[in-house]
Image (spheres, rainbow, N blue to C red):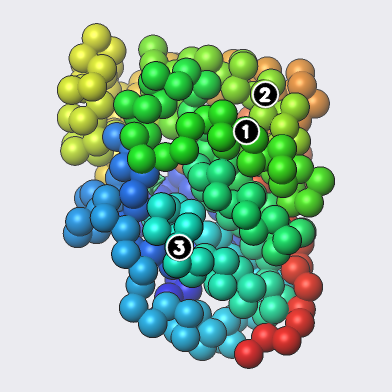
Amino acid sequence: MRVLREFDPWRGELCTCPKKFSFSPYTGCGHSCLYCYISSYIRDPFSPREKKDVLRKLSMDLREIKPGSIIAMSTSSDPYTPPEEDMKTTRKAIEMIRGAGMRLLVMTKSDLVARDSDLLEKAAVSFTITTLDEGIAKILEPGAPSPLKRIDAMKKLSGRANLILRLDPIIPGLNEDFESVIEVAREAGASHVVSSTYKAREDSLKKLENAFPWLKLHELYSEGTRISGYLYLPYRIRRSLMEKVRKITLNLGMTFATCREGMPEMHSPGVSCDGSHLSSVMIRDAFV
Ligand code: SF4
């Protein structure tokens, strides 16, 4: 395969994702989140560019996988990164994925996804919202649309796509306003919450320390553990944060899962950690 890849989070030992394929129309991402880890393996990580010949390659790859497979867009760049507004490559890719009768999980921080609502029936759309504090969001995710725009986009898609709130990453002491985030996302139509604490890589940890020195993240993470190449917070802190998020989520009648925390016993019965259980086969039509 050329542009579709079987999802393999660097053989992450705590990953509980179902079998799925990942597809990123772009290399790099303009949202430039401080906690992003793509800088550890992508050259020019925050200058997004369309992959060469991407739609032709996608068309070939779609013929090699079984209809009904889950395709996650995207795991290493936002499919609605700024150039998508003009290029519409993600939109064209969704038309092809739909036509091939696949299941689709879109993961984004952009309100631009609402433009494609006509194509997203039966898809699962996961919105990452880390905080409602616009000031913090502007520092943390400088190139991404504001949290309020994301909420508006959720409202526009509600009733058409199945909506997931991705509350990830939680950075202790910085974005612990998760009760309000979950409440607002539920009102906007989300039914499932996926949450995770910040897993540090050296470069992203440095950026966060420079932006928020009072959090003393280095000290906190030095007490933690290294798992699959990432520094994790001490288990007791991660567990306590996940328990708080889970309690709020369940009290609001939503389902809950964690991502790469090693706590699958906290997940609601019958759900996938990434929310892909909320996707179903899209209409199979004239796929060429
Ligand atoms: S949206 Fe995702 S891929 Fe893009 S910069 Fe932020 S964390 Fe990285």
- Judged by depth in the image, the label closer to the viewer, 2 or 1, is 1
Single out the residue that lies furthest toward the front: 86
Q: Which amino acid does label 2 sit on?
A: Val
Res. 184 mark: 2
| Displayed quadrant of residue 217 | top left
Give the image quadrant in which the ligand numbered 1 is located: top left
- Say what secondary structure mark 1 lies in: helix
Res. 260 mark: none
Q: In this view, does 254 lie to the left or right of 93?
A: right
In the rendered picture of this protein, how many numbered marks are placed on residues?
3
Q: Give the x, y percent position of residue 265.
A: 63, 33
- How far, Cα to Cα, is label 2 from label 3? 30 Å
- Say what secondary structure mark 3 lies in: helix
Q: Is mark 2 within 8 Å of ligand 1?
A: no
Residue 6 visible to an observer of this rendering: no
Q: Mark 1 points at which residue?
A: 151
Whichever of callouts 2 and 1 sits on the residue coming sooner in the sequence is: 1
- Say what secondary structure mark 2 lies in: helix
- Judged by depth in the image, the label closer to the viewer, 1 or 3, is 3
Single out the residue that lies furthest toward the top: 214
| Displayed quadrant of residue 231 | top left
Q: In the image shown, does 257 or 135 lie closer to the viewer? A: 135
Q: Name the residue under label 3.
A: 86
Q: In the image shown, does 148 or 285 lie closer to the viewer? A: 148
- Kindly identify the residue that appears in the image at 76 percent across and 18 percent down: 251
- Kindly identify the residue that appears in the image at 80 percent across and 26 percent down: 253
Q: Does the residue labelled 3 lie within 8 Å of ligand 1?
A: no
- Kindly identify the residue that appears in the image at 48 percent across and 57 percent down: 85
| Displayed quadrant of residue 77 | bottom left
Q: Give the x, y percent position of residue 60.
A: 51, 88
Above or below, comparing residue 166 to residue 68 in the picture: above
Whichever of callouts 1 and 3 sits on the residue coming sooner in the sequence is: 3
